[in-house]
Structure formats: C-alpha cells, structure tokens
Image: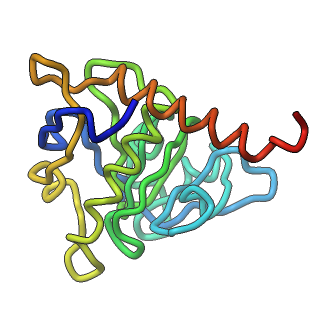
C-alpha cells in the first residue's frame, strides 16, 4: 500500500468532523489525585497540561469565583482529535478518554464513522500539515477551521477511503514495532 498510488481530494474540515469549541474557562484546580485530563495549548504530553477532579471542574469558572456554566459544557467526550488553536497552534492529539480543556482547543469528532486509533493517527498527520498556515497571531479557531481543507485519499466514488487510511496506518505501526523489537526475533 503506497500513498502515491491513491487518488487524493481536498475536503473541508466540516465535511469530515463535527468541530467543537473548547471551554472558555480558567484552568480548574489541578490535583495529584485528579483523573480527568486538562488539555491545553501545548506541544507536549498529548496536550495534557494537568489532571483535575470532577468536583474541581464543576467549581471552575471564567472569573475564578463561582460556577458560570453547567458542568456538561466543561466536559468533552473522548475518542476525538484535539487541535490547539492558540499558543502551539496546529498540534493535534488523539484523546481517548473524557477530558476538559481550554478555549485554545478544538475538539474534532469524526462524522459517519467510529474513530479508531489508526484512523486518528492518520488524521493527525494530515491535520498537522495545515499548521503552517496558522500561528499565534492567526489563531485556528473553529470559525477558521470550518473553511480549512484536509487532503485525504478517496475511493472511486470520491468519498474518503477510511479503510485505506486505517490499513495503511496499521501497516506502518507493525513495521515500526518489528523494527524496534527485531533484536528479540
């Protein structure tokens, strides 16, 4: 399977993903007992800048005093790709667990298909290729992301070839695994 042997087509992000806005809130208190990742605009640690608790997230507010939004607006379901739109603009990460985040994050939920780890990894590479068009002064907020384009391999009918993306990534993962562990064989 080679990328060069595939036909590619540009899709707008909105055709592929449900684009959400992160929560405009002060960072909730971080806690060593926290189990909920806080995703921020960083280029490190899969976007995780700390760990919080459900109670601390519920208490957090924009001003730092008193709740300002319902809890469900502060939490996001996992199994999505999060993209930094500020600071380290254009970094993308697969977030498997439920999380909370800052407004510097765009959570992306795949439409029309369940997002698997190999598929997420393929998308991340393609999304990060767009980062060169954005920087701190030109944030990649959801309002800009809807008009951004994503190049993807397509099937004969012009729809994204998710099966190819998944199989291609799995093959790369197996090759990397075998290369890393070849001295055991």
Q: Decide which of 127, 135 is in the foreground and name it.
A: 127
Where residue 138 sits in the image (x, y, percent)? 20, 76
Would residue 36 appear left or right of 2 to someone viewing this image? Answer: right
In the image, residue 81 sits, relative to residue 161, either above or below, namely below
Residue at position x 38%, y 42% in the image: 73
Residue at position x 13%, y 48% in the image: 146
Q: Residue 25 appears in which quarter of the rendering?
A: bottom left
- How many labels sit on residues? 0
Q: Decide which of 144, 5 is in the foreground and name it.
A: 5
Would residue 17 appear left or right of 172 to someone viewing this image? Answer: left
Q: How is the image coloured?
A: rainbow
Where residue 110 sits in the image (x, y, percent)? 32, 30
Residue at position x 58%, y 66% in the image: 44
Where residue 133 sits in the image (x, y, percent)? 20, 70
Residue at position x 45%, y 24% in the image: 167
Q: Quadrant of the N terminus?
A: top left
Task: Give the residue at the far bottom of this rendering.
Answer: 137
Would residue 35 appear left or right of 42 to someone viewing this image? Answer: right
In the image, residue 22 sits, relative to residue 184, either above or below, namely below
Would residue 178 appear left or right of 85 to someone viewing this image? Answer: right
Q: Quadrant of the C terminus?
A: top right
């Amino acid at each position: 399977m080679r990328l060069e042997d595939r036909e590619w087509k540009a899709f707008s992000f909105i055709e592929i993903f449900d684009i959400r806005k992160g929560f405009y809130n002060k960072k909730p208190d971080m806690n060593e007992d926290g189990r909920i990742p806080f995703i921020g605009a960083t280029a490190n640690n899969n976007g995780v800048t700390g760990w919080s608790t459900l109670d601390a997230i519920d208490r957090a507010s924009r001003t730092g005093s008193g709740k300002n939004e319902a809890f469900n607006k502060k939490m996001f379901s996992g199994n999505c790709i999060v993209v930094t739109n500020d600071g380290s603009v254009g970094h993308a990460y697969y977030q498997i667990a439920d999380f909370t985040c800052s407004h510097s994050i765009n959570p992306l939920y795949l439409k029309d298909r369940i997002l698997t780890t190999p598929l997420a990894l393929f998308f991340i590479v393609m999304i990060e290729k767009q980062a060169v068009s954005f920087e701190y002064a030109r944030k990649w907020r959801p309002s800009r992301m809807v008009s951004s384009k994503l190049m993807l391999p397509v099937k004969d009918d012009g729809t994204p070839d998710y099966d190819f993306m998944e199989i291609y990534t799995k093959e790369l993962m197996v090759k990397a695994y075998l290369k890393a562990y070849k001295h055991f064989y």
